[in-house]
Image (spheres, helix red, strand yellow):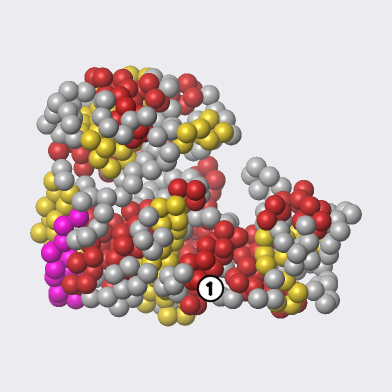
Amino acid sequence: MTVPIATVLDAVEAAGVAVRTEVPSGVSVSGVRHDSRNVRPGDLFVAWAGAAHDGHEFVRAAGDAGAVAALVEREQEGAPLPQIVVDNARLAGAVASGLVAGDLSAEMTTVAITGTNGKTTTAFLARHVLSSRGPAAAVGTLGLVGADGRRDPTTEGLTTPGFEQITEWLLDLRANGVESVVFEASSHALAQFRLDALRFDVMVFTNLTRDHLDYHGDWEGYLDAKRRLVQLSKPDGIVVLNADVPTWIGMPLTGGRLTYGMDAPADVKAENLDLSVVGASFTLTSGGVGAPVRIPLLGRFNVENALAAASVALAVGMDVDQVAAALNAAPQIPGRLERVTAQPFDVLIDFAHTADALDRVLQTLRPLVDGRLLVVFGAGGDRDRAKRPRMGEAVSRYADVAIVTSDNPRTEDPAAIVAEVGAGVTGRAHRVDIVDRREAIRWALEQARPGDMVLLAGKGHESYQVVGREKRPFDERAIVLEALGLEGGS
């Protein structure tokens, strides 16, 4: 689809972006790119200054590759293409991408899920449930999960990719007959306008705790980023709210709403709850109708995630029996209290990497352990330092042995991070510091006895470790199986 640049910029201005230079005449756009390596003749290039790279440095390269114009926040001298200066290139690029691609979200059922924890599980379950009414995909921390329910491991990365990647994936999904797409909407993505090319039928707000304050500056900044999601609603969009979070319930809304909750009064509830080491069973109730559900996911918080996913399906017209039937066939979710082995003791992997997430996971596991609970965990580098001792505190409330190690240290000193996390470990837990994560895992497995449980927290589905600026292969499942001499180790 080719669109006159003047039409593109009209849409950009309508979105509230100031255009500070004259629009070139006679120019049409066939695509929108913010990665100069992907530019093709006829594309509009979009440049902004990011944390690691400044796109303005690549305006000349984009022009040489055939870009017909560039949206920039500051003009680049000598670039071989027209430059249009705007005050918000991220938002302008997303709006332009959505227009040139042809409003992809109008042709699909689109869902966005935000919250501190629970996004990935809720998105995975929502995709699974929606697939019972037609082909459905999900985009998020696990990468792209296709209509067949399989992850594409090459697509792992950001919780929410940029508008260029989103547009490419949606074009491909639409061409392959996908009818519904579920997105995880991180606070970073909302603040950076990555989803502004789309409009959503259902917007889900899960739980809310401290995270990413290193980026957003303070609690209000974090909340403001989350709240942006309601601005991306389709005219008849429905907001799904966790009724147990007062902040969400007090949020002003103009459209439809549906609530779910474990404790507070809500439209969608779980009754007759039974939790065990193999999963959870409950009665899904809504509108006076109930149906039995059994899921292979541990813990009360995963029932909460299942309620959120059920609410998505109910919001788009499925009934309680249909939703329950789909949940009863739900699979295990990679890296979310995923059991690697139960012999000679339980070993689980989970993505929990905040104090609240650790608290929720460990509160779930503690009653299920006959012996000792050994937890291998750490904090990511170049991220919110204030949460590190709080993570140690959370683990020390439940663990018998707290093995503090590296997560993704990035450009920080791993030993310094371990010390900051370990400072919070007090009370019942015996603290052991082992900076090398592979060695920490092996040590925990050597110490564990029948009846014990080992939790590897923080990396979850990830098959890599970020050291410096390098992603190094790191498969915790393979490490566990190799250490225990079980099939599948490498």
Position of 211 relative to 389 (above/below): below
The location of residue 79, given as percent across then percent down, is 85, 56
User: Along the horizontal axis of the image, is 468 left or right of 277?
Assistant: right
Hey, which quadrant is residue 367 in on the image?
top left
**Residue in view at x 49 percent, y 24 percent:** 414
Hey, which quadrant is residue 75 in on the image?
bottom right
**Residue in view at x 32 percent, y 27 percent:** 482
Q: Is residue 71 visible?
A: no
Q: Secondary structure beneath disc 1? A: helix
Position of 44 relative to 157 (above/below): below
Residue assigned mark 1: 104
> Is residue 288 one of those drawn in magenta?
yes
Position of 333 relative to 489 (above/below): below
Callout 1: 10 Å neighbours few (<14), some, many (20+)? Answer: some
The location of residue 466, given as percent across then percent down, is 51, 34
Region rendered in magenta: 283-295
